Image (spheres, rainbow, N blue to C red):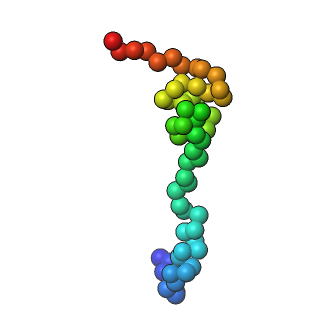
Amino acid sequence: MAVPKKRTSKSRKGMRRSHDQVAKPGVVYCSCGEPTLPHRICSSCGTYKGRQMLTKANDE
C-alpha cells in the first residue's frame, strides 16, 4: 500500500485546494430593484429584459 514518505505542508495542501471553493452566483438587479439570477424572470415583478412576462394573480 502506498504511504507518503514526507508530510504534506500546510502551504502545499492549501495550493492544492485553492480551486475547491464554492462559486458565488452572479446577481443582477431588476428594474424594480430586486436581486435576481441572470437570464431569468424576476420573481417579484415578472419582467425579463424590460418586457412583462408574468402577471400577478390576486388571491382574493
Q: Among all residues in the image, which is located at the extreme right?
A: 49
Residue drawn at 63 percent across, 34 percent down: 39
Front position in the image: 44 or 1: 44
At which x and y percent is residue 32? 55, 32
Work out which quarter of the rendered image holds the C terminus and state it: top left
44 is higher (above) or lower (below) than 25? above
Residue drawn at 49 percent across, 85 percent down: 7
Front position in the image: 37 or 5: 37
Tally the marks. 0
Q: Is residue 36 visible?
A: no
Q: Among all residues in the image, which is located at the extreme left?
A: 60
Q: Among all residues in the image, which is located at the extreme front?
A: 32
At which x and y percent is residue 20? 54, 62
Q: Is residue 16 visible?
A: yes
1 is higher (above) or lower (below) than 26? below
Residue drawn at 35 percent across, 15 percent down: 59
6 is higher (above) or lower (below) than 26? below
51 is higher (above) or lower (below) than 14? above
Q: Quadrant of residue 29?
A: top right
At which x and y percent is residue 19? 59, 64
Residue drawn at 58 percent across, 71 percent down: 16
